[in-house]
Amino acid sequence: QVRVVESGGGLVQAGGSLRLSCAASGSIFSINTMGWYRQAPEKQREWVATMSSGGSTNYVDSVQGRFTISRDNAKNTVYLQMNSLKPEDTAVYYCYVLANTYGQPRRDYWGQGTQVTVSS
């Protein structure tokens, strides 16, 4: 089993910054992709950013240039540095991990989410 735990959310004024962290633990053999989604009130969950095990990154257009995803493979941890935050960034942010566990096929695992609120 794999446990995924996010932290770092909170309330910030527009233009401010927050850094989210997500740590995966458990019977992990290897981790492929790590990334972030978000879900605003009454909206569908939206992909935000991903980072491959090789270091390739991708971002949704709305956060390009403001958010930076990074990871520490030794700690099975992924981060999301969010700068120049806007009220429209307000959402619950979810971390996901695409991982192989011992004896099990590769699948994605999700955290419980962390709330990010940006005030205008």
Image (cartoon, rainbow, N blue to C red):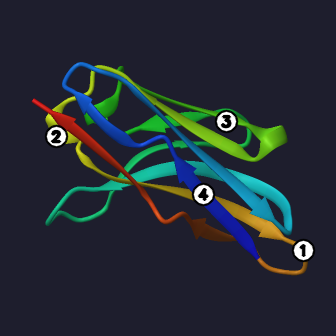
Taking the spot 23% from the left edge, 19% from the top edge, the residue there is 15
Dot 4: what SS?
A: strand
Q: How many marks?
A: 4
**Which of the image's four quarters has the N terminus?**
bottom right
Residue under label 4, please give it. 5
- How crowded is the residue under tag 3: few (<14 C-alpha within 10 Å), some, or many (20+)? many
| Gap between marks 3 and 1 measured at Cα | 22 Å
In this rendering, the answer to whether 119 lies above or below 111 is above
CB of mark 3 within 8 Å of CB of mark 4? no
| Gap between marks 3 and 4 measured at Cα | 14 Å
Q: Nearer the viewer, mark 4 or mark 1?
A: 4
| Amino acid type, mark 2 | Glu
Q: Nearer the viewer, mark 4 or mark 2?
A: 4
**Which comes before the other along the chain, label 3 or label 2?**
3
**Which comes before the other along the chain, label 3 or label 4?**
4
Hey, which quadrant is residue 65 in on the image?
top left
Residue under label 1, please give it. 102
Dot 3: what SS?
A: strand
